[in-house]
Image (cartoon, rainbow, N blue to C red):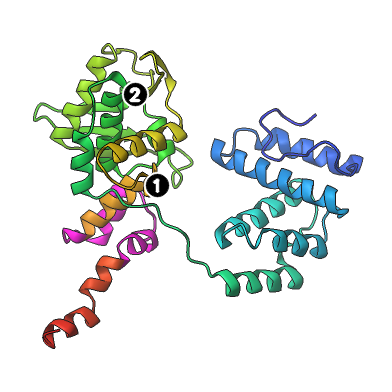
Amino acid sequence: MLEKNYPIAIIPGAEPIDAGVLAQLAHYSRHASGAFSKNTERALKSDVARFTEFCTEQGYPSLPTTPEALVAFLTSLTETHATASIRRFLSSIATFHKAAGLESPTHSMEVRMAMKRHTRAKGTRQRQAGPLNRPLVERMLLAHEGTLRDKRDLALLAVAYDTLCRRSEIASFTVGDFSFSEDGSGTVLVRRSKTDQEGAGSVRYLAHDTVVTVKNWLRAAGNPQDPKLAMFRGVNNSGQLGEHISEKGINRAFKRLAKRAGADAKCVSGHSCRVGAAQDMVAAGLEIGEVMQSGGWKTPVMVARYSEKLSARRGAAAKLAVLQNR
């Protein structure tokens, strides 16, 4: 039997799987359970289920699959999926085969040519979350009605901006992860992240005004003392507290505040503070290494991507235009 949290999904109705392959999948299941983050498990299950369903509908084998099946699958995604998403599908399908002890055709010539056609047609540039820069964050911090949910949303926003944390990291914070200093500042422990799967942890700074906002939320939530209790909890329409806030709940919180502040909420997501704070750091003249440390990046690629418009305004072309008085 496959483990309940097995990171590979097999949908009902798919072609029968060889007994030896099924045994290999079960073996992989036992050893892989708990080895992946929840987000990775969800992505693997979703991607493989989507591919298996496609193969079942179109009459292709899914395990082991063929280059022909993969090319047909990629072609079906071209109009609706970005290049990064399609590469994730390929990675998931390769993992599916590896788990079964089978050779994956994801690196075959046919598949590589299909990916080249896709990238030539659509490019590799990924969409970026709309930034929440400090001026807009300030407006959003004033855009509230004083409800319990509002106080939580403000604390979420303030912490997200100071820490540059991802949604999954923010959602997993507990009361015990937060420490407050006598000078009014604070810190929060990020126990695990996308780039720290082994849980070495990192500590992020909280400014004085953020600490005030967090303490206001804690008082409104009844000053919870259990260090293992979720710091940011769901709040229903009746003002009742629930469990850990979800990643989608963080998105909704930021969109709600942005709309009240008169901003375009469509461009705002739970990732927006990460983008905006990184841009503000670069604009303030902070070194790339400092920004990387603050946001938990291992390489400067994303920092450079987030700040590319600012870099263009500071580049040689911009300086030449000033020298030419135009």
Location of the C terminus (image quadrant): bottom left
Location of the N terminus (image quadrant): top right
In this view, 158 is above or below 112? above
Numbered circle sitting on residue 318: none
Residue 174: percent from left, percent from top: 36, 24
In the image, 137: left or right of 254?
left
**Mark 1 and mark 2: Cα distance apart in space:** 27 Å
Numbered circle sitting on residue 231: 2
Q: Nearer the viewer, residue 131 or 194?
A: 131
In this view, 143 is above or below 81? above
| Magenta segment | 283-308
In this view, 45 is above or below 231? below
Label 2 sits on a secondary structure element that is loop
Q: Residue at x 80, y 53 (%)?
A: 102
Which is the main secondary structure of the residues drawn in magenta?
helix
| Picture quadrant where residue 10 is located | top right
Residue 309: percent from left, percent from top: 29, 67
Residue 37 seen in the figure: no
Amino acid carrying mark 2 in the image: Met
Residue 189: percent from left, percent from top: 32, 33
Q: Residue at x 30, y 32 (%)?
A: 156
Nearer-N-terminus badge (1/2): 2
Q: Residue at x 72, y 29 (%)?
A: 3
**Residue linked to disc 1:** 266
Q: Nearer the viewer, mark 1 or mark 2?
A: 1
Amino acid carrying mark 1 in the image: Lys
| Picture quadrant where residue 12 is located | top right
